[in-house]
Image (cartoon, rainbow, N blue to C red):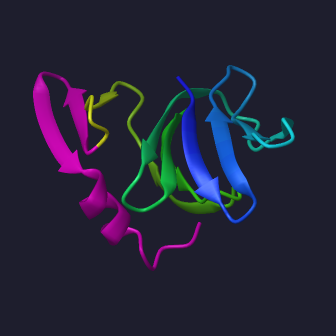
């Protein structure tokens, strides 16, 4: 699934792919590959105007200009899913379920730089 964010130049799209995360400026449809690691899904965090990306062994927030805001390493057996309204992230690992709001995740990485 793709995620849309707004930038000063208009709307941008983040598209997950097995070859890496792709970024497109929708006004011109010019794009580029942002990462070399496979990206499995993206989710727009509208309240922070960022995009959450589930990448190979990592969970990352990207700014609309495709710069990496922060990143967490994740256990390979962890299954992640975003809620339908895009406000919650759920995790299932070995039968244990955890739930976080995207707002709290974004706040936790406010000062973090990869």
Q: Quadrant of residue 10?
A: bottom right
> Magenta residues?
87-114
Q: Quadrant of the C terminus?
A: bottom right
* Relative height, residue 68 to residue 30 (above, below): below
- Residue under the point 84% across and 38% down: 31
Residue 53 image point, x, y percent? 51, 40
Residue 36 image point, x, y percent? 76, 36
Residue 4 image point, x, y percent? 56, 41
Of the pair 48 and 38, the residue shown nearer to us:
48
In this view, the residue farthest toward the bottom is: 111
* Relative height, residue 108 to residue 101 (above, below): below
* Relative height, residue 27 to residue 95 (above, below): below
Residue 100 image point, x, y percent? 20, 49
**Residue 108 part of the magenta segment:** yes
- Residue under the point 62% across and 27% down: 16
- Residue under the point 76% across and 39% down: 24
């Amino acid at each position: 699934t793709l995620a849309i964010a707004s930038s000063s130049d208009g709307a941008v799209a983040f598209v997950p792919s097995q070859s890496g995360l792709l970024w497109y400026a929708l006004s011109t449809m010019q794009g580029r590959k942002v990462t070399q690691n496979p990206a499995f899904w993206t989710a727009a965090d509208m309240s922070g105007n960022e995009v959450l990306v589930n990448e190979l062994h990592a969970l990352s927030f990207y700014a609309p200009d495709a710069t990496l805001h922060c990143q967490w390493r994740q256990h390979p057996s962890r299954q992640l899913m975003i809620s339908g309204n895009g406000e919650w992230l759920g995790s299932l690992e070995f039968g244990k379920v955890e739930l976080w709001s995207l707002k709290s995740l974004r706040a936790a990485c406010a000062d973090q730089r990869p």
